[in-house]
Every structure is written in C-alpha cells, then in structure tokens.
Image (spheres, helix red, strand yellow):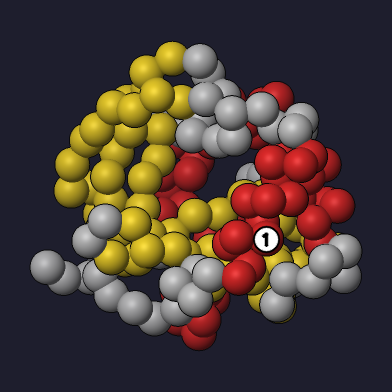
C-alpha cells in the first residue's frame, strides 16, 4: 500500500503541532541534538522565525491523511546543505520519514552534495537516511542538549564528492 505523503509550505498554524511534537521526551532523546529547553516557547518561535526567513533554509510540512506529521528541511552548515527532519512519534515506523525525505530531496531541494547527521544509537533514523541514498562518511561527537551529554554521531553524505 502506498504511503500517503505530501509536502507543503509551512504555515503559521503548523507551528502549534511542531511545538507539541518537540515536547515529546522520547523524540528528543532519539533526535539528541535539539533545543536546549524544548518547553521554551519564545525560543521555539524565535528559531522558527529565523529559519523561515532565511534564504538558505528550505522547509516543508509533512502531511499524511490530511494531518500534520512533521517537518523536513535543509539549511547551509559549513561546507554546504544539510538535511534534517522530525516526525511526531505516532508516525514512526510507517515509512513516512523515508517517503517524505525522498520527496524532499527529489523535488524540493535537489542540491548535492547533501549532508546529514544522526546519533549513532538512532538506527531508525540512520536507516531512513540510507534508504534515501546517504552513506556514512565519518563520525563525530557533540554535546546533545536532549541528553545532557556528549553523544556520538554518524556524518552522512548524499552525492559527490
């Protein structure tokens, strides 16, 4: 059965859902590299205002069955574009993240090479990235706000070099 996945421009009303999703402790743990305080609405609003205004950021809302499931975006970091995504936990394990990321990469932001990062202990997200063609090209460690500790991560790349 095909996955119902649509990407659309972010509208103000989406932010309520994104903020509620950000409050999920398990989702924060899995993402690892998150906001310092996910309950800080003012910081959340400021972050999204900056992201939506930036010319180097491409963001889409992920829709399924007429409902907001999450977001997918790319931003310029260091050497080039990097991709990130977030799904509400109720949408995990359905193939929706893979479908949304594939659509985003093909139709919304075809820039290559594209980079991604994932906590080493998040095999589901690693699998999503690999299904979309990303390959592990390195490892790093960084302070993960959601865990309050240094966390190992994989560095991934889609396309040359």
Residue sitting farthest toward the top:
149
Is 95 situated left or right of 125 in this image?
Answer: right
Quadrant of the snapshot with the N terminus: bottom right
Residue drawn at 28 percent across, 65 percent down? 80
Residue drawn at 36 percent across, 45 percent down? 117
How far across and how far down the image is residue 111, in percent?
34, 78
How far across and how far down the image is residue 29, in percent?
58, 25
Residue drawn at 63 percent across, 68 percent down? 52
Residue sitting farthest toward the left:
161
- What is the total number of numbered labels drawn onto the structure image? 1
Q: Which residue is mark 1?
A: 49
How far across and how far down the image is residue 69, in percent?
76, 57
**Which of the 4 image quarters holds residue 114?**
bottom left
Quadrant of the snapshot with the C terminus: bottom left
**Which of the 4 image quarters holds residue 76?**
bottom left
Q: Residues within 10 Å of mark 1 (few under 14, many from 20)?
A: few
Q: Is residue 153 visible?
A: yes
Residue drawn at 58 percent across, 62 percent down? 51
How far across and how far down the image is residue 122, in percent?
46, 33
Q: Secondary structure at mark 1?
A: helix
For the residue pair 19 and 100, the one nearer the viewer reads as 19
Q: Is residue 97 above or below residue 31?
A: below
Q: Is residue 99 visible?
A: no
For the residue pair 22 and 125, the one nearer the viewer reads as 22
């Amino acid at each position: 059965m095909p996955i119902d996945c649509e990407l659309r421009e972010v509208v103000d009303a989406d932010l309520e859902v994104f903020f509620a999703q950000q409050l999920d402790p398990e989702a924060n743990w899995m993402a690892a590299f998150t906001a310092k305080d996910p309950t800080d609405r003012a910081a959340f609003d400021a972050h999204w205002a900056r992201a939506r205004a930036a010319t180097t950021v491409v963001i889409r809302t992920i829709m399924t069955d007429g409902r907001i499931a999450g977001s997918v975006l790319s931003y310029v970091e260091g050497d080039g574009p990097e991709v990130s995504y977030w799904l509400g936990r109720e949408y995990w394990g359905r193939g929706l993240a893979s479908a949304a990321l594939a659509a985003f990469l093909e139709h919304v932001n075809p820039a290559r090479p594209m980079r991604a990062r994932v906590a080493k202990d998040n095999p589901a997200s690693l699998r999503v990235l690999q299904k979309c063609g990303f390959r592990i090209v390195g490892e790093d460690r960084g302070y993960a706000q959601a865990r309050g500790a240094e966390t190992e991560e994989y560095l991934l790349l889609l396309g040359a070099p």
